[in-house]
Amino acid sequence: MLLDKDISHVLCSKEEIEQIIDRMADEINRDYKDKNLLIVGILKGSVVFMADLMRKIDIKCKIDFMAISSYGSSTRSSGEVRVMKDLSTDIKGYDVIIVEDILDSGNTLSHLKEMLKLREPASLKICTFFDKPSRRKVDIKADYIGKSIPDEFIVGYGLDFAEEYRNLPYVGVLKPELYEN
Ligand code: IMP
Ligand code: MG
C-alpha cells in the first residue's frame, strides 16, 4: 500500500484487529442478549471499527451516528467538544453503546456521556477500540476495550492525522517527521 511508507511501525495488524473484533463482539452478544441495543458510532474515527463490529454482532440491534469534535488537525486534545451532527434516534429506553476509535484524554467521551445521560437511555456503556490510559485527564473508563496502548500517536483503521490515513487497513505509528515541524 502506498501509505505504508509514512508508517514507522505497525501497532495493530489486520490479523490482530480481526481477533480483537471477534472477542469484543462475543462480549457484547453475551451482555446484550435480552436488551434493547442501540449502537452509536462517533464519526468519523469509529466508522471502520463500527462496520466490522456490527457484522459480528448477532443479536437484534439498531445503529446511529453522531459527530463531535475535540481535535483540530493537531495531535493533542483541545478539551473542547462540539456537536457537529446529532443522533437521529431518541435514545430514551435504549441500551446504548457508544463506539469510539480511541479513548485518550477522555474529554470527548466524558462530555458526551453526560450529554447522552440526560436523554434517559436504559443504560449507557462505552466501547473503544484503543485505550491510552496514561494520557487520561478526566476520570473515565471504557466498558469494552480492544487494546490498551502506550502514548504514541497512531493512524489507520479509521484514525486520522489531519483527516488523512483513515483508510489504512491496519494501525501504525506515523513517522515523527510527518507531524513534528
Ligand atoms: P480525547 O477527548 O482526548 O479522549 O480524544 C479522543 C479523540 O481524539 C479520538 O476520537 C480521536 O479522534 C482523537 N485521537 C486521540 N488519540 C489519537 C491518536 O493517537 N491518533 C488519532 N487520533 C487520536
Ligand atoms: Mg480524530
Image (cartoon, helix red, strand yellow):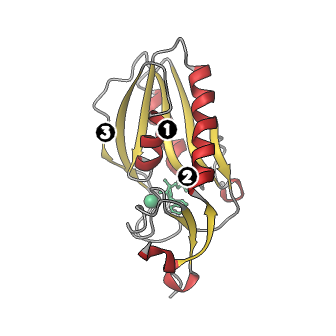
Total number of numbered discs in the rendering? 3
Question: What's the residue at 56%, 80% (across, down)?
Answer: 175
For mark 1, give the secondary structure. helix
Give the mark nearer the N terminus: 1 vs 3: 1
Question: Closest to the observer: 142 or 76?
Answer: 142
1 or 3: mark nearer the eye? 1
Residue 22 quadrant: top right
Question: What's the residue at 64%, 68% (across, down)?
Answer: 152
Question: What's the residue at 64%, 42% (across, down)?
Answer: 145
Query: In the rendered image, is residue 99 in sight?
Result: yes
Eyeballing the image, is 19 above or below 79? above
Mark drawn on residue 102: 2
> Distance from label 2 to label 3 (Cα)?
20 Å
Q: Under 8 Å from ligand 1: the CB of mark 2?
A: yes
Question: Closest to the observer: 162 or 69?
Answer: 162
2 or 1: mark nearer the eye? 1
Q: Residue furthest top?
A: 34
Percent across and percent down for residue 174 are 55, 74
Mark drawn on residue 169: none
> Distance from label 2 to label 1 (Cα)?
15 Å
Query: In the rendered image, is residue 142 in sight?
Result: no
